[in-house]
Image: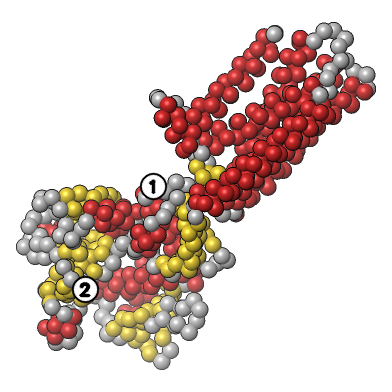
Amino acid sequence: MDTKIRGRAIVILLVVLGCFFGIIGFPKNVQELKDNLHNRIHLGLDLKGGMNLILQVHVEDAVNITCDDALDRMKEELKNKSIPYADIEPDNDNSQNPPIHRIIIKGTPQDRSSDVQTLASDLFSDWDLVRVPGDETARMMVLKTSSAITIRNQALMQSMDTIRKRVDALGVTEPTIAEYGQNDYELVVQLPGVSDLTRVQDIMQKTAILEFNLVQDGPYSSRDAALAQHGGVLPPDSELLPHSENGNEDWYVLNRIPAVTGRDLTGADPSRDSSGQPSVQFTLNHDGAERFGRVTGQNVGKYLAIVLDNRVITAPVIHSQINESGVIEGGNFTPQSAQDLALELKSGALPASISYLSTETVGPSLGADSIRHGVVAAIAGLIAVMGFMLIYYRGAGINADVALALNLLILIAAMAWIDATLTLPGIAGVILTVGMGVDSNVLIFERIREELRLGKAVGAAVAAGFEQAFRTIIDTHVTTVASAAILFAFGTGPIKGFAVTLTIGLIANLFTSVFVSRVIFDYVLSRREKGAELSI
């Protein structure tokens, strides 16, 4: 064996070893070897079973939140600029679909209209400020159509990201979360191996909007009692929220503007309080810590309500200034609920509420049946193809069969190395790879036959056959990989599985049919007697 063939053979040996380690990992004992063989290839929803959910993201919630924030900011800015006004309120046009969001500012003096215009231009670039017909002292802020579309699309993308973080934290392997439908703001969520539908739905659906609000007064035994204490009208910039504990409900009057919100969190983890009860420890970013420290430092001895999704969890006394970290306790947490709350807060709040359009549970028995039939089809196809190559190409058929077996080994190992998910269409991709692999060998062998018919020497015919067939093989593989890339970009989980297995198989096929097969031919030629015919 000459040096060139020996070097290429070492490369092939290293690839084979890498494939075996990709499949079995680096086990320390027999049990770990069995576990690796069982777990290295991840199965998709259609094979492993699990849940398939279709969600509706109510993106208009995000637009409404943006409008409420703009209204509060405008109030604050008018106050800071000493611009008087009689009233400011939303005035949405709900007859349109989607609604047109508007805010009316009433009672501003005409001589301050330019100041209002400047304020809107500088700080509210997403809004147009227009005059109200028939009222010289009124102005109307109208949310731009392009801005509303951007908010809705961002809400959809943020919902996808938040749901993905929550699902990943649950330990789900290879979930699929993607857009569904045509501009309907719907998502498809596929969760292989998940069986606890209720818990997953609760965690995914919670908006998890956390706020820390100062308590003005309370608690009151009922909503009516709280309103009666204030003459039926709440004080300005306040809100009335419920609190439940041990089956009893009471009500607190809180500052409407929170000291900090969940957006200021940098982390949240389940913990234990001083009495050993489950709690949630949180940390704040720099700006949030500065604001929280200022608010708590100025209100020592007062009550601070911790509000989650418009319900008061607890309202402890502020004993001292709190800066970058704190603990949420007193919420009657269980270890599971504390862990879930930490997960929800850490993944961020959903920008809009979601609802379930459909929930489908896929049983693992269907997956087992699919795997069994898919494996039988793959083995039957492999045996048929390998048998045909042996009969039709004789000795060279052994070359093709070795390359084909190595092709499948590389494909399986690559999926294990990159943690790819095998789906039912993915099995179809494996079977198609078998056909594509043998097709490359057929092209090469037929070119070698043509060169031999032209009277070329065996070595020259083999070299010309590989050289001439290589261009065609590259063309067919590049076009197929491009098609697979489109499937991966626009398909959902199972279709992406097909694209992944097909692409890996095609790349492996280039290596086996062009490189490995050529090394085998060169080795055979180096060992043959001079003048002997090539078995092809």
Q: Is residue 229 left or right of residue 527?
A: left
Above or below residue 431? Residue 112 is below
From the viewer's perspective, is the residue at label 1 or at label 2 nearer? Answer: 1
Q: Amino acid at mark 1?
A: Gly
Q: CA distance from mark 1 to mark 2?
A: 34 Å
The image shows a total of numbered marks equal to: 2
Residue drawn at (20%, 76%), measured in percent from left and top? 240
Q: Amino acid at mark 2?
A: Leu
Residue drawn at (62%, 49%), measured in percent from left and top? 425
Q: Is residue 158 visible?
A: no
Q: Is residue 282 left or right of residue 106?
A: left
Q: Which residue is mark 2?
A: 241
In the rendered image, residue 72, in percent from the top left (x then y), is placed at 29, 72
Q: Secondary structure at mark 2?
A: strand
Which mark is drawn over residue 334?
A: none
Residue drawn at (47%, 64%), measured in percent from left and top? 359
Closer to us: 151 or 360:
360
Q: Is residue 111 left or right of residue 380?
A: left
Nearest to N terminus: mark 1 or mark 2? 1
Residue drawn at (37%, 53%), measured in percent from left and top? 166
Closer to us: 197 or 306:
197
Q: Secondary structure at mark 1?
A: loop
Which mark is drawn over residue 171?
A: 1
Q: Is residue 4 visible?
A: yes
Above or below residue 343? Residue 105 is below
In the rendered image, residue 85, in percent from the top left (x then y), is placed at 28, 82
**In which image quadrant can residue 527 be found?**
top right
In the rendered image, residue 465, in percent from the top left (x then y), is placed at 82, 25
Instruction: Give the quadrant of the C terminus.
Output: top right
Structural crowding at the residue carrying mark 2, measured as other residues with C-alpha within 10 Å and reported as few (<14), some (14–19) or many (≥20): some
